[in-house]
Amino acid sequence: MAVNEKRVKDLMVPIDEYPVVSIEATLLEVVNALHESHSAGPPDREPPRAVLVMDEQKRIVGKIGHLLVLKAVESQQHIKCTINALTSGGVGQEFVEWMVENLRFWQEDISDLCRRVRKMPVKEAMLPIHESIDAESSLGEAIHGFVAWQTLSLLVTRQGEIVGILRLADVYHAVAAEIRNVRDEDAKGEKYE
């Protein structure tokens, strides 16, 4: 199929083939779902790098991927709580700034941080999803969506229902293949110089 004829539905991963967790799940459940999806997926497809989050009404409301898991590990929620308590108790701003500078994440034991976030609710670390694209949209519309929204994936809808997820990597591979395969004489209009 020519790249100009491809639709979002041709490149999307069906929703039932993508890892999903409940909004009540923990980060440990997210990490386990990602691990399982990496080993269970087809060998010709890149593994998922995110898990979708479903609410009580079975709607996809968010996603969490590698970067957000690492941000959760790095987050200093326990320090923020301590700082809030100190500032509300009258401790000066200069001392609080000194604490922030000197109580850095990288000084803590990574195993301790990982132990802390295992039970963190996914809803505290996930990214809410608002962007979507229709399954019948063109590849050009998908590229525009990725660039405009600066996202790694888009929910795919058909008649308002979520039917899949379109990943930036899959769109990139289709475009990269076209760049490699298109001949200059096939190009319409002026050549890039």
Image: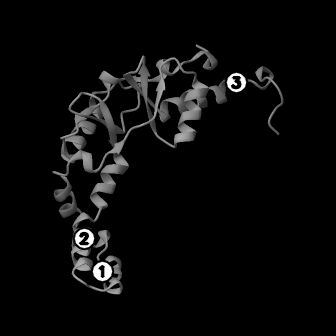
Q: Position of residue 144 (x, y in %)?
A: 59, 34
Mark seen at residue 187: none
Q: How packed is label 3: few (under 14 Cα within 10 Å), some, or many (20 or more)?
A: few
Residue type at mark 3 is: Val
Q: Is residue 78 left or right of residue 152?
A: left
Mark seen at residue 79: 2
The earlier-in-sequence mark between 3 and 2 is 2
Q: Is disc 1 placed on a helix, strand or loop? A: helix
The earlier-in-sequence mark between 2 and 1 is 2
The earlier-in-sequence mark between 3 and 1 is 1
**Front-most of residues 50 and 79:** 79
Q: Is residue 19 left or right of residue 166?
A: left
Residue where numbered disc 1 is placed: 99
Whole-angstrom CA distance, mark 3 to mark 2, is 54 Å
Q: How is the image coloured?
A: one colour
Q: Position of residue 14 (x, y in %)?
A: 37, 21
Residue where numbered disc 3 is placed: 182
